[in-house]
Image (spheres, grey):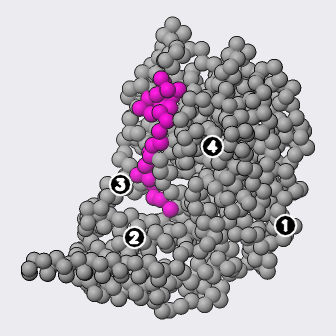
Amino acid sequence: MFRRVLFTVAVVLAGSSALGQIGNPAGMGVDTRMARPGVPAPHQTNNQDRLFAQLATAGGLAEVELGNLAGGKAKADAVKQFADMMVSDHSDANRKLKELADAAKIPLSDQLDPEHALLRERLRTLEADAFDAAYIKAQIVDHQKTAQLLAWEISMGEDGDLQRLASSLLPVVLDHLRRAQEIHGLLTGASVRLPPETLAEMEHRQ
Amino acid sequence: MFRYKRSFILAACSIGAGFCVFAVGAFSDPLPPDTTYRPLPTMPFSDARRIDEAQKPDVMKRQLDLLQRRYDLSDKPMPGAMMSGGMKPVQADIRVRLPAGVTWGELTAMKPAEIKQKNLLPEGFLPLPHVKQATGGQVFPNRQIDEIHAQEMRDLRRFDVDFDLPDNLTPEFPPPIFLTTHPELGDVSRGQLLTIKNFYEIMNGIVTPVQMEGLRLLLTPFPQEEFNQTEDRKVADQSTGVACLDCHSNFHTNAAFHLTPDIRPQADRFRLDSTSLRGLFNQQIHGSKRSLRSVEDFSEFEQRTAYFNGDHVSATRKGANLPDRTNQVAMMAQMQNIIDFPPAPKLDVFGRLDPELATPQELSGERIFMGKGRCADCHVPQTQFMDNDMHDLKLERFYKIGQVFNDFVALPDGPIKTFTLRGIKDSPPYLHDGRLMTLADTVEFFNLVLGVKLNEQEKKDLVAYLVTL
């Protein structure tokens, strides 16, 4: 419940301040259809939007797939809860992304990409503490990459709807990253930047 | 034997795991290339310009809305406090707007996590967006644009954006120039802006031949990301470029801004307010993020950074100027190293207030600066109110990161260089990105961030002290 509230708050916050995405026209496609001068038409995409939709979809699919795996297999409660959160938050984001991609006629894959397929195979061979640590480490890398990808779409894309979605997802992804780093710290003793909030938040939720 | 065998198996497993990690790495795709590199423009110049001009009213309105939501931008001079040239009053009062239903006192009584959770950090304390984040680049105030046009017929006006802050919240223009080599002369600017046209007339007889040549180079326009010959420029005519002192007017600052060259992707790059070059001779690290160790390094590398966003690839296409280290950079550095701070007659040789000259309020402010306020932990009077170090204020304790404001992602600032406070009344807006408009704003900001819980009188005294520096 708490994370739903958090997610909604983030969407409202970011959405309200991201109403006017205004890109650099030097990088726009020469065939850009305009709703009015200077404003790309709804669902007008450029190469960056299309690549973003595909890469973000691949990442989102992997989050759900690996989250399901970890939900059943993880040893630590914190990892299990994190995995459940990945399944629910990313299912929601994937659905929104698919709606916008369909509207802009961007073809999306429904298969796990090779990198994550390989990771899934590797995770299947691990158990208990080794599984937890490997899953969380991979989550940190995935969320780092996703945060950069979302920021890239915000400045380089052209489809306002996709950019607004990216804006609304970014605080959530960064929050996931922080949680993953904190859980990694709990599991392995690795350092975190600020005092951990995750445990207190979990207690708050219960 | 058994133990040996087990450790062998463990070693084999860890090699196996290492191989797996490597295999995953080798299989993965990197992020898209234009996350780091600037893409070549796809649009013809005339079309890009037409679209930019059509977007401009929305761009400016969006930025003005944000500024007015965050700050009181009105003209409220501080009685009796003028900038060092005597041309412009120092601005008074707190300008950052509080969220509804909370006072400064209530805010400072809360823990950072509570402020974050309730979303109560004043928006004006967050990083300040560039007027057009997706493009970024150098934006000059109108006074600079007009003066350079009048003297040199060179155009610094962009067609996609205008400068966004009101004139009353920027430094006086043109700023006075004080030289370490001639303290007795006082301001040597003659009330003029130094340009490639007039520098010899103004400085001949005052500086050495080496300094004069350094000055000439600092005033010579060279191609820059937005001001050049290519279809990627943001100025109407093909441009010969910009000069170092187009931002650092008269070796001070005119509040021209830019995006940090040190961060990618574009949406994450924070705004940079031009810093003053006064007192550079005592500064050991340069650049808010880069911590370059000499003014020579900085003068040389600015051709890659301030001019081309830390992108030597784009620079090569648009025309990079690479000054010769021994014959040109050294002269540019020597000129910069004779620029003094403005006079601070109430300070003694250790940078402390002279009790016979200072008012009781200023002396009280100094005690707070040195003690309860903890300002002097970094801004050390003995070393020109800096510590030649970088510090991380960890502002993200107070807000949820990743929120997007005008296409700019608010993220932790990380370690930032301590700036000098000598002559600080002359260089609004404050902080590396100019997010704070007045000295009173900076006192509120640090009161919250450092958790020092100053009372109203202490804050007023501290502002009175800062004006004496």
User: Which disc, if any, is residue A52?
Assistant: none
Tell if the residue under mark 1 belongs to the same chain as the one under mark 3: no
- The answer to whether residue A6 of the structure is visible from this angle is no
Are dots 4 and 2 in contact, CB under 8 Å?
no
Residue B253 place in picture, x, y as percent: 69, 36
Q: Give the range drawn in magenta.
A: B375-402
Q: Mark 3 lies on which chain?
A: A
Q: State the image coordinates of residue B459 (x, y, percent, origin top left).
A: 47, 29
Dominant secondary structure of the residues highlighted in magenta in the image: loop
Dot 1 crowding, Cα within 10 Å, few <14, some 14–19, many 20+? some
Sequence-wise, which precedes: disc 1 or disc 4?
1
User: In 3D space, how far apart are the residues under numbered discs 4 and 2 (Cα atoms)?
Assistant: 35 Å
Instruction: Check chain identity for marks 1 and 4: say if they share one.
Output: yes
In the shown orientation, is residue B31 left or right of residue B195? left
Q: Mark 4 points at which residue?
A: B298
**The numbered mark 1 sits on a residue in which chain?**
B
* Same chain shared by disc 1 and disc 2: no
- From the top left corner, tell me how far across and down residue B67 is, in percent: 64, 49
How much space separates mark 1 and mark 4, taking CA atoms? 32 Å
Mark 2 burial class by Cα count in 10 Å: few <14, some 14-19, many 20+:
some
Residue that label 2 marks:
A140
Label 4 neighbourhood size at 10 Å, few (<14), some (14-19), many (20+)? many
Name the quadrant of the N terminus of chain B. bottom left
